[in-house]
């Protein structure tokens, strides 16, 4: 049994799997690097 869901990264468009309640899933980025770029904090 798994709670993993598929999400599409907001920055690079890659599909990634994460737990639906994980931070990555909530934010919609596959990695910290994509999150930084997506939020314009780079
Ligand atoms: Zn990404």
Image (tube, helix red, strand yellow):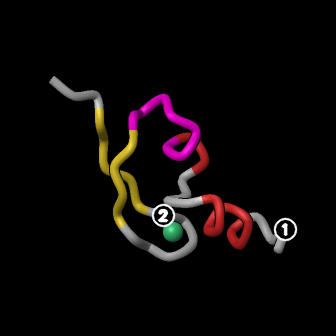
Query: Could you tell whether 19 is left or right of 32 in the image?
Result: left
Q: CA distance from mark 1 to mark 2?
A: 17 Å
Q: Quadrant of residue 3?
A: top left
Q: In the structure shown, which secondary structural element does the residue marked by tag 1 occupy?
A: loop
* Mark 2 beta carbon near ligand 1 (under 8 Å): yes
Q: Residue furthest right?
A: 41
For residue 25, above or below residue 10: above
Where in the figure is residue 40, as x and y percent of width and height? Answer: 81, 71
Which label was assigned to residue 41?
1
Write the start and end of the magenta stretch as one range. Answer: 19-25
Q: Residue visible at 71% across and 72% down?
A: 37
Q: Is residue 21 left or right of residue 41?
A: left
Label 1 residue near ligand 1, CB within 8 Å? no
Looking at marks 1 and 2 on the same chain, the residue that comes earlier in the sequence is marked by 2
Q: Is 32 displayed left or right of 36 in the figure?
A: left
Q: Image height check: is 23 above or below 14? A: above
Q: Quadrant of the C terminus?
A: bottom right
Residue at the (39%, 43%) spot, across then down? 18
> Residue most toward the top?
1
- Give the x, y percent position of residue 29: 55, 58
Indicate the quadrant where residue 36 lies: bottom right
Q: Which residue is mark 2?
A: 9
At 49% from the left and 43% from the top, the residue drawn is 25
Circle 2 Cα neighbour tier, 10 Å, few/some/many (<14 / 14–19 / ≥20): many
Q: Say which quarter of the image contains residue 34.
A: bottom right
The reply to whether callout 1 and callout 2 are in contact (CB within 8 Å) is no
- Measuring from the top left, give residue 4's x and y in whole percent: 29, 37
Check if residue 20 falls in the magenta segment. Answer: yes
Q: Is residue 19 left or right of residue 21?
A: left
């Amino acid at each position: 049994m798994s709670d993993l869901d598929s999400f599409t990264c907001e920055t690079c468009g890659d599909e990634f799997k994460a737990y639906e309640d994980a931070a990555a899933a909530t934010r919609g980025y596959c990695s910290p690097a994509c999150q930084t770029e997506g939020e314009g904090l780079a």
